[in-house]
Image (cartoon, rainbow, N blue to C red):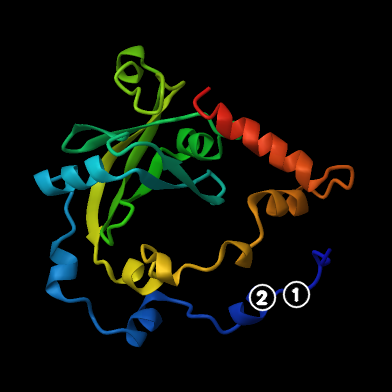
C-alpha cells in the first residue's frame, strides 16, 4: 500500500495550478448568451417532464468542513417528486446506511442534483437549499421504490440548468457497440474486497453479501 507521506501527482500539479478566476477566464472564451440565459430559478413544464423521465439522479453535498460527496439515487422513472415549481423531494431508499449525503445536508443545508435519463443525452442540474424530512404526510406519497422511505431529501431550487448533450454524446454512454467488454473492468466484488483489506474474506464472500443485498434491495 502506498505511503500516505509520498507526494502525489496532485501535489506536484498544485504548485503552478490556476490560482484565481481571472486567470482561469483568460484560458476560455466567454460563454454565449444562450448558455447564460437558460439558467432559471424554477421549473418549467419541460424540466418537470425531464425529472419525471429520470430514473437516476446524482446527489452532490458537502459537510461543514468542506468535505465533498457525490452519491447516486435510483428508482423507476418518476421516483423523484416535484412538490412545486421550486421544490423536489427524493425518497431515501435502502442503501449502505452510512448516510453520507443526508448527514452533509443536515450540517450545511445545501445540495446539488444531476438528473440522468437512460438512453437520452439530456441531463438536468438543480442546485439549492436542502433539508431532510421525515414528515409522514410527505413520505406516504413516495412509494415508487417499494414502500414509504425512512426520510426524503428535499431541495429548494435556486438554480435550474439543462446541460447540452455533448458530454454524454462524447462518452457514447448509450451506445452498446462502444461499451467495454464485461471482463475489461474489475467486478464490484473485486473492488470491494480490495477496499476492505481483510485477508480472511474471499470473492465468494463478497458476492454472497452483494446478492443478498440486491435480493432485498427495498427493505
Q: In this view, does 63 lie to the left or right of 41?
A: right
* Vertical relation: 183 (above or below) 61: below
Residue lying at 77% horizontally and 39% vertically, measured from the top left? 205
Circles 1 and 2, Cβ within 8 Å, touching? The answer is yes
Q: Where is residue 104 in the image (x, y as percent from the top left)?
A: 51, 39
Q: Where is residue 200 in the image (x, y as percent from the top left)?
A: 89, 42
Q: Position of residue 121 (x, y in %)?
A: 28, 62
Q: Which numbered marker is on residue 11? A: 2
* Vertical relation: 169 (above or below) 72: below
Residue 114 in view, yes or no: yes
Residue 42 in view, yes or no: no
Q: What element carries label 1?
A: loop
Q: Is residue 144 left or right of residue 19?
A: left
* Vertical relation: 132 (above or below) 5: above
Q: In this view, does 64 lie to the left or right of 53?
A: right
Residue lying at 34% horizontally and 43% vertically, measured from the top left? 55
Q: Residue furthest right?
A: 200
Q: In this view, does 160 lie to the left or right of 180?
A: left
Nearer to the camera, 198 or 151: 198
The residue carrying pointer 1 sits among few (fewer than 14), some (14 to 19) or many (20 or more) residues within 10 Å by Cα, namely few
Q: Which numbered marker is on residue 81? A: none
Alpha carbon of mark 1 to alpha carbon of mark 2: how far?
6 Å
Residue lying at 70% horizontally and 42% vertically, measured from the top left? 207
Q: Position of residue 111 (x, y in %)?
A: 39, 44
Q: Residue furthest left?
A: 45
Dividing the picture into quarters, in which one does residue 206 lie? top right
Nearer to the camera, 141 or 173: 173
Residue occupied by mark 1 = 7
Nearer to the camera, 130 or 180: 180
Q: Quadrant of the N terminus?
A: bottom right
Dividing the picture into quarters, in which one does residue 48 lie? top left
Amino acid at each position: 500500500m502506498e505511503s500516505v507521506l509520498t507526494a502525489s501527482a496532485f501535489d506536484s500539479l498544485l504548485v503552478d495550478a490556476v490560482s484565481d478566476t481571472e486567470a482561469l477566464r483568460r484560458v476560455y472564451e466567454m460563454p454565449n448568451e444562450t448558455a447564460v440565459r437558460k439558467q432559471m430559478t424554477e421549473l418549467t413544464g419541460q424540466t418537470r417532464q425531464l425529472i419525471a423521465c429520470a430514473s437516476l439522479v446524482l446527489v452532490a453535498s458537502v459537510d461543514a468542513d468542506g468535505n465533498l460527496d457525490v452519491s447516486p439515487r435510483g428508482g423507476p422513472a418518476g421516483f423523484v417528486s416535484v412538490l412545486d415549481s421550486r421544490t423536489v423531494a427524493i425518497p431515501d431508499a435502502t442503501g449502505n446506511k452510512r448516510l453520507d449525503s443526508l448527514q452533509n445536508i443536515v450540517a450545511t443545508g445545501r445540495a446539488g442534483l444531476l438528473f440522468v435519463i437512460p438512453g437520452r443525452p439530456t441531463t438536468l442540474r438543480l442546485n439549492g437549499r436542502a433539508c431532510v424530512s421525515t414528515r409522514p404526510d410527505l413520505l406516504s406519497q413516495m412509494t415508487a421504490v417499494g414502500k414509504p422511505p425512512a426520510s426524503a431529501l428535499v431541495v429548494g431550487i435556486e438554480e435550474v440548468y439543462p446541460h447540452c448533450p455533448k458530454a454524454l454524446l462524447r462518452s457514447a454512454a448509450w451506445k452498446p457497440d462502444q461499451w467495454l467488454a464485461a471482463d475489461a473492468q474489475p467486478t464490484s466484488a473485486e473492488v470491494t474486497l480490495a477496499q476492505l483489506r481483510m485477508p480472511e474474506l474471499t470473492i465468494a464472500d463478497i458476492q454472497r453479501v452483494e446478492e443478498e443485498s440486491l435480493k432485498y434491495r427495498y427493505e
